[in-house]
Amino acid sequence: MADQTEKKSKKKQESAAARIVKGYHSRLETDYKERILPEMMKTYNYKNVMQVPKVTKIVINMGIGEGSRDTKMLDALRDNLKTIAGQHPVITKAKKSISNFKLREGMSVGCKVTLRRTRMYDFLDRLMNVCIPRIRDFRGLSPRAFDGRGNYAMGVQEQLIFPEIKYDSIQKVQGMDIIFVTTAKTDEEALSLLKLFGMPFRN
């Protein structure tokens, strides 16, 4: 059942991606091909362009915690995430029951969206240049939040850093996790890649 849901989600994402204006290329997509890729090849001496790491997808996940039984809150968060990502989110379910948290298997625990290709690049561009500068007391992203396999996790404390979300339209200030999935073989290469895109890591 979970596999069928995932397949349906992928079809929706593909159809959504297909609706992007034909011939349109994101600024960062072009920048990757023209500047970042050659720079990475020079730095790491890759033998061909297929070895150069790239970002393959960005996953945005919002959990509802103690509001897991509140369908109105879940609907509100799903609407927020749709507005932020420009794509329909899928509801995430608990994979197992945890009595201490009054959590049952199959219970709705949040929503997520997976961005690829042009939508991914557009989101990354907006995140870096519009949203991150709106984070209060921001001192740079931690370079330690890689998973050892070239993927990076960024936590956001509130959805209000996205200008599309208006304060009077939210039921609850809610954080989210943003995962950057890359083809880099090492965290060092992934860090270099994301820095070249303009991700503001602290020293």
Image: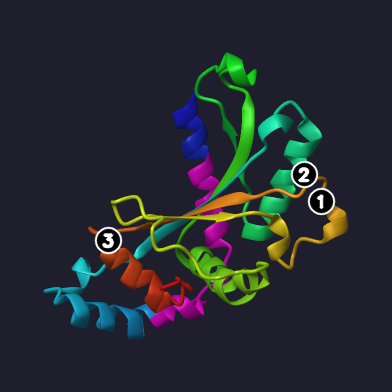
Q: Where is residue 1 in the image (x, y as percent from the top left)?
A: 49, 24
**Callout 2–callout 1 Cβ contact below 8 Å:** yes
Determine if the magenta segment contains residue 16.
yes
Residue 27 colored magenta?
Answer: yes
Amino acid type, label 2: Ala
The percent position of residue 194, horizontal first and vertical second, equals 39, 70
Residue identified by numbered label 3: 184
Tell me, yes or no, if residue 86 can be seen here: no
What residue occupies the far left of the structure in this picture? 47
Mark 3 touches mark 2? (CB < 8 Å): no
Name which of mark 3 and mark 2 comes first in the sequence. Answer: 2
SS at mark 1 in the image? loop
Residue 130 visible from this viewpoint: yes
Q: Which amino acid does label 3 sit on?
A: Ala
Q: Which one is in front, 46 or 88?
A: 46
Identify the residue at image location x=76%, y=61%.
165
Which of the marked residues, 1 or 3, is nearer the chain's N terminus? 1
Gap between marks 3 and 2 measured at Cα: 35 Å
**Vertical comparison of 168 with 102: above or below:** below
Q: Which residue is situated farthest in the bottom direction here? A: 35
Q: Residue at x 85, y 54 (%)?
A: 169
The residue indicated by pointer 2 is 76
Q: Residue 161 carries which label?
A: none
What is the chief secondary structure element of the magenta stretch?
helix
What is the distance, in whole Å, between disc 1 and disc 3 at their CAs? Answer: 37 Å
**Quadrant of the drawing holding the C terminus:** bottom left
Residue at image location 45% in from the left, 71% down from the top: 202
* Marks 2 and 1, how far apart at CA: 7 Å
